[in-house]
Image: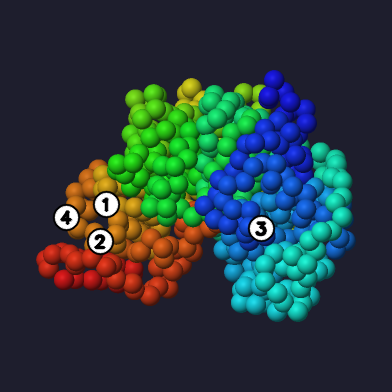
Amino acid sequence: MFLQRIANNGIRLGTLLDRAAAGFPANFVVSDHDLDIAPGLGRRATITELAGLVDDFASRLWAVRVRPGDRVVIHKSDGFDITLLALAVARIGATAVLLSPKLDGDTVAELVRRVNRPYLITDQDKLEHRLPAEITDLTERVLLATGDHPAATRLADLAGSPRTLPVEMSPDHPVLITHTSGTTGIPKLAVHTNRTFQARYRPQAGVVALVGRREPIAMHMSFVHSRLFTAMPISLLQGHPLIVLRDDEPAAVAELFTRTRPGIIETHPNTLLRWEVLADDPRGPLAHVKYFSSTFDAIHPRTVATMLGASRRRNPRYAQIYGQSEVGPIAARTYTAARPFDGRCVGMPFPGMTGVRVVSRDGKPVSKTNPGFIEVRSDGRILTYLGERQRWEHQVNDGWWRMGDLGYRTRWGCLHLMDREVDSIPGIDSTLEIEDKLLTRLPELVELIIVPDPDGVPVPVVCTRDDRPLEPARWRAALKGLPVLGDPVQWRREDLPQTATTKIKRLELARLLIAGAPVREPAATAAPAHESVRAHGEETAA
């Protein structure tokens, strides 16, 4: 019944919290931070309170003449109020354009230019210190979520604006514009509609329905990512308390999870990697989790095994979901502790909802050693790339969308992902598979990325727990049975270039290595005198 109701009505972002509050008025959202636009609300708010907040800010936007069909760029300091402001924009029939707080000012200006004179919601810090001066000339009007600036209107000054009724737009009208990860250059602007969002959360709603309604669902993901706007409705419309995290610092997360006891956790793979230390916390912050899930990037088998081992629930599961911002979820598979996790196997398509094919690159049969282009069909596919229709059309082939990934399908139809097209290295079947094996063999590693040097040699960039020097003897032993790699280069994890969803920007990382990025020495004791490893691009020895 729930799936049918969703399929008929669509996502309707503008009235999402109203409908959730009508069914579960006392349900609540717990956050790890105060809202910039409503700091007095606190870190635990009912759905009814949040619905009122969205209604209030929709009316403030209406008061400055934001109208149906207008575009409103939201680029402010990180926080859950980015999501709430997007709902407010949708409530009056306008289209929110969400730009990550992590984007640099020049990139933001280029994307704003592509949107063509939108309204801009930002804050004083961004306007004064992060954005170029030309931003005010590129926008219709600048609105401040916090702070003050002579070239902008403060949303706080619009408190008390007359409430306005929600505006119902066509299911095919753009409801939200998000940007791609930007791992290969300037991000693209992906245009979503109520209908494309509707198609995305239908295949996932069933998983949440398997968990008791009172079980909290914890989400730590980028507040500008399209995934949040499908995951959140599923949770709230089924009456689940929601735990929203801005930060992934393990100590703070452990304290919050110990208090709230989530039954489902969804976050970025690299965040789960960072949370491996929670498995050893005597308070058991992960003990109550029934389902772990991530949809943003490849995840390593070691991390999945650690998460499942930390749960004390009967038969906990990890949901491996393969998808992309442009098309939504495409394939899925669940794993238990009893079933060894294959990091390359991303599962089966959703019957009747998504389709997958793998096209040969060279006319020869597609296999593990000769992976092909992964192409998919989905009703959740975006409408276009805003201002770049030609780039969108370049990825569409007779209705099939090229994912930019390489893989193959087994005789049973299971899809295996080997590499991104742009990250593949000649002579290596899968850099991701090698990374999985090395991370499993070396527990001291907290990240490992393989990128090519100027001669095409695969170079491992490694990060260790607490930045301890990598032990050369252990590294050499871990290489047994693997293709020949270049000498490892040790970096601090926080220095790796990342996207809003914590993906490592591999192309940028490779460019930094070639350019000879500044050396930042690991903080712990050096390696033995007779051995050495490279630290952040240089040779170091005891």
Residue 46, visible in the rendered structure: yes
Q: Residue at x 33, y 58 (%)?
A: 463
Where is mark 3, residue-wise? 38
Q: Is 393 placed left or right of 516 in the picture?
A: right
Dot placed on the residue nearer the N-terminal end, 1 or 3: 3
Q: CA distance from mark 1 to mark 3?
A: 42 Å
User: Residue 113 falls in which quadrant of the image?
Assistant: bottom right
Dot placed on the residue nearer the N-terminal end, 1 or 2: 1
Q: Which mark is residue 473?
A: 4
Pointer 1 and pointer 2: residues touching (CB < 8 Å)? yes
- Helix, strand or loop at mark 2: loop
Percent position of residue 396, x then y: 69, 43
Amino acid type shown at disc 3: Ala
Q: CA distance from mark 1 to mark 2?
A: 9 Å
Pointer 2 and pointer 4: residues touching (CB < 8 Å)? no
Q: Which mark is residue 137?
A: none
Percent position of residue 479, x then y: 24, 48
Q: Which mark is residue 444?
A: 1
Disc nearest the viewer among 3 and 2: 3
Give 337 or 238, whichever is nearer the viewer. 238
Where is mark 2, residue-wise? 468
